[in-house]
Amino acid sequence: MALIEIENLTVTFRAKGREVQAVQDVSLSVDERESYGLVGESGSGKSTILRAICGMAPVTGGTIRIGGQPVPTPRGRAFSTEVQMVFQDPYASLHPRHTIDRTLSEPLAIHGMPDRDARVVQALTDVGLPPAFRFRYPHQLSGGQRQRVAIARALMLRPKILLLDEPTSALDASVQAEVLNLLNRLRAEQGLTFLMVSHDLAVIDHMCDRIMVLQHGRTVEEITRDDLAGARMTTPYARSLFAASADRMLEGSERPAP
């Protein structure tokens, strides 16, 4: 059963008398517990799709449905219990003057949920952080630890869907692997559905069951993980993305250790 359904989505930004169509007639569906990837160069519209789902980008055409129901405008509290987003920069997404405890407790307070202390401790444990971290501030944590906190915050309301916008691109390679493995474990344990954006095909290959390739706001093609692993793309653009990603991986492996 499709948990996320997008049909003919169009997103148009208007500024200073100009219109820019960031997304044009994109359609996709994501099954429950599936991990679906969006890839493409900068400006391809992949992050805009996530923001449109959350109500942070102007939908000017098409429909978005979660669990078979059209998303409301504005999104409201019920939507936030179903869908949460994890952003690229963990430091920018955490309030610098709020302790981790306050950051994680706030969604629970807004929704009137009980047992806040126990839920905060459990959330930290779920993402591999000790309970004592709840009394620290973001600047006292490493980049990987901050992203773990951002993931914990996204899971506080026990949503079914996580929208992941380049969740590891700001992290070192070794930390990236830890966070990606954490996300895969949480998906399996909590029955989560992922819609994930990345420019890195190696990350997408590790995380996603199916992938949509985007260019200039339009769908180029949709492939499976097996297609990606076997380099079975049908369009020149998708093949060029694969070749560029493979070249970057080769350069990284050949770079001498510092």
Image (cartoon, helix red, strand yellow):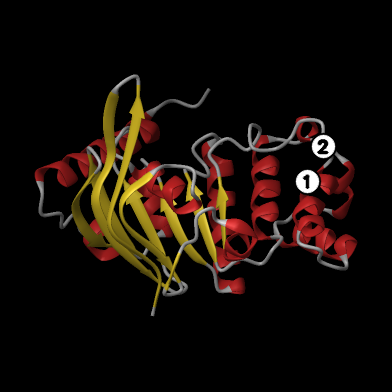
> Which numbered circle lies on residue 103?
1
Which residue bears the numbered disc 2?
Answer: 98
> Tag 2: Cα neighbours inside 10 Å, few (<14), some, or many (≥20)?
some
- Measured as percent of width and height from the top left, residue 82 is found at 58, 66
- Confirm whether residue 129 shows in the render: no
Tell me the CA gap for discs 2 and 1.
6 Å
Which residue of the protein is positioned furthest toward the top in this rendering? 16
- Measured as percent of width and height from the top left, residue 222 is found at 22, 59
Q: Nearer the viewer, residue 10 or 239?
A: 10
Q: Residue at x 49, y 27 (%)?
A: 257
Q: Tell me if 114 is positioned left or right of 151 in this view.
A: right
Q: Tell me if 65 is positioned left or right of 85 in this view.
A: left
Q: Residue at x 69, y 55 (%)?
A: 152
- Measured as percent of width and height from the top left, residue 31 is found at 39, 73
Q: Tell me if 134 is positioned left or right of 83 in this view.
A: right
Three-letter amino acid code at the position of disc 1:
Thr
- Measured as percent of width and height from the top left, residue 182 is found at 60, 58
* Image quadrant assignment for residue 97: top right
Q: Nearer the viewer, residue 256 or 151?
A: 151
Image quadrant occupied by the N terminus? bottom left
Q: Secondary structure at mark 1?
A: helix
Q: Tell me if 202 is positioned left or right of 187 in this view.
A: left
Q: Nearer the viewer, residue 61 or 34?
A: 61
Three-letter amino acid code at the position of disc 2:
His
- Residue 188 drawn above or below residue 107: below
Q: Residue at x 30, y 57 (%)?
A: 211
Evaluate if marks 2 and 1 touch, with contact meaning CB atoms under 8 Å apart.
yes
> Tag 1: Cα neighbours inside 10 Å, few (<14), some, or many (≥20)?
many
